[in-house]
Amino acid sequence: MALRAAILRHVRVPVQTLTGGRAQLPYGGSLRFLSSHDDHLSKDEVIERVLSVIKSFPKVDPSQVTTDVHFQKDLGLDSLDNVEIVMALEEEFKLEIPDKEADKIDSSNLAIEYIYNHPLAG
Amino acid sequence: MSVTSTAGYLARRAAQRERVRILYRRALKDTLNWAVHRHLFYQDASELRERFEANKKVEDLDTIDRLIDDGEASYNKWRHPDPYIVPWAPGGSKFTRNPAPPAGIEIVYNYGREDND
């Protein structure tokens, strides 16, 4: 018992902390691994990319686009434009949204929430 | 017009609107499947949109139902046999592929020859 205590006092297992996270990655953290979905999108990034997709839609006035804009009521689009925007968002984030759920996305707020909570948005 | 028939009319219109939205969504995706390049897709997509816009002003409910049925039949007839599937989705190229190991786990490729032999 004494021997064990003496050994335990002297033996040390070197502790290596994982130096990781996005800050340590090359290319300023913008490197995205093609095969892993471990690092999830941040909310800011989702917001920025969703808004840029909506702004680049031809019939939309970019100055009116905010995070809680309703596509049909605020931007003057019709339901088919809404379908096109949702499809553009699917392509931007490499998603496949089921038809019934995609049909319910009618504002940028809903789109941001859906994409941010989707585990495979990339 | 009584309240029930108005409600029935609105419910039927809402159902038709949803059918049209979903049909347009599927048809637009299928257009992208058929188009080899983006610049071909843009032309095809605007032609598809014109086909939908042509019947925008139709008011008669039975006519609308018949038009939607025609559209769905046409969609089913020309559906792409090998559509694009997002890689992680069922049927996609990455579906159930092994995920990357978590950070900090190292794979040593020395094929069983450890240091002591």
Image (cartoon, coloured by chain):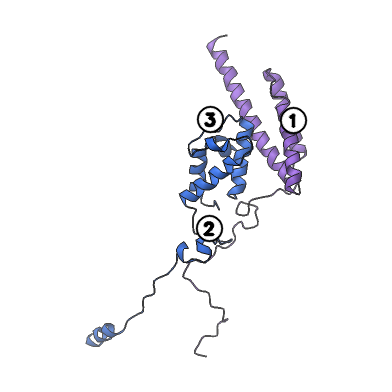
Chain colours: A blue, B purple
Circle 1 — which element? Answer: helix
Callout 2 amino acid: His
Query: Viewer-proximal residue, B14 or B90?
Result: B14
Q: Is residue B103 shown left or right of residue B64?
A: left
Give above or below for A78 relative to A2: above
Picture coordinates of residue B108 (x, y %)? 53, 78
Callout 3 amino acid: Asp
Q: Nearer the viewer, mark 1 or mark 2?
A: 1
**Mark number, residue B51:** 1
Q: Which residue is the site of mark 2?
A: A37
Q: Is residue A91 visible?
A: yes
**Chain of the residue where label 2 is placed in the rendered structure:** A
Q: Which residue is the site of mark 3?
A: A74
Callout 1 amino acid: Arg
Check if mark 1 and mark 3 are on a common chain: no
Q: Contact, CB < 8 Å: mark 3 with mark 2?
A: no
Picture coordinates of residue A120 (x, y %)? 54, 52
Q: Residues within 10 Å of mark 3 (few under 14, many from 20)?
A: few
State the CA–CA distance, disc 3 to disc 2: 34 Å
State the CA–CA distance, disc 1 to disc 2: 40 Å
Picture coordinates of residue A94 (x, y %)? 60, 50
Residue at image coords 74%, 43%: B41
